[in-house]
Amino acid sequence: MDDVRIRPATAADLPAVKGVTDAAYRHYIARIGVVPQPMEADHAAEVAAGRVFVTGEPVTGLVVIEAHADHLFLDSIAVHPDAHGRGVGRRLLEFVDARARALGLPEVRLYTNALMWENQEIYPKFGYEVVERRVDGPYDRVHYRKRLD
């Protein structure tokens, strides 16, 4: 059973952060025709900035978040394929909601590639609504928000 604790990532977690992110997103390269942005992120800078939170021992999932004045931005969520079906993603999304509430932020925002249709089925189940679809460079993105009570 995965360690259910979600904690800030440390520099020692960098190989796991990259490994889990790559494993979670690699299969999308052929489908969308470009490397997904999370795979190209500066993981060291994100960890140093306190934006990455991990779960599992070894790490099986992570989120990258960024607080803004009026929302918490969920930049990336990644679950290692070996951990699918264990509730890791659900726990991470619940953590993001709790983090936003703790920071006094009224909503969570995120986007996903329009060709990552699995995500478009998942996010509405967790209370996210589509705000818009927009092309940003090589990425065709569906933008979501979740208003928190």
Image: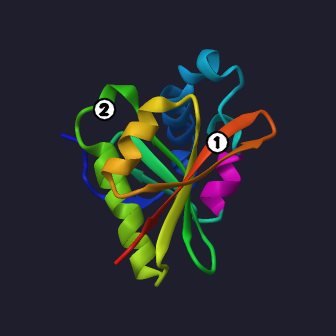
- Residue 119 x, y percent position in the rendering: 44, 38
**C-alpha distance separating marks 1 and 2:** 26 Å
Q: Which mark is residue 82?
A: none
Residue for point 41% across, 80% down: 102
Closer to the camera in the image, 125 or 5: 125
Instruction: Identify which residue, 7 or 104, lies in the foreground.
Output: 104
Q: Amino acid at mark 1?
A: Arg
Q: Which residue is mark 2?
A: 83
Residue located beneath label 1 in the image: 141
Asked whether residue 149 is in view, the answer is yes
Q: Between tags 1 and 2, which lies in front?
A: 1
- For residue 96, side relative to residue 46 (left or right): left
In the picture, measured across the screen, residue 112 lies left or right of residue 82, that is right
Magenta span: helix, strand or loop, mainly? helix
What is the magenta range?
A: 42-48
Q: Position of residue 147 (x, y in %)?
A: 43, 70
Per the image, label 2 sits on a secondary structure element best described as: helix
Q: Quadrant of the N terminus?
A: top left
Residue 136 in the magenta stretch? The answer is no
Q: Residue at x 56, y 37 (%)?
A: 15
Q: Nearer the viewer, residue 37 or 57?
A: 37
- Residues at discs 1 and 2 in contact (Cβ within 8 Å): no
For residue 50, above or below residue 121: below
Q: Is residue 27 above or below residue 36?
A: above
Q: Is residue 59 visible?
A: no
Q: Relative to 102, is 114 on the left or the right?
A: right
Residue at the bottom extreme? 104
Query: Label 2 is placed on what type of residue?
Result: Ala
Give above or below for 70 relative to 37. below
Find residue 11 and report its horizontal and vertical position in percent.
58, 52
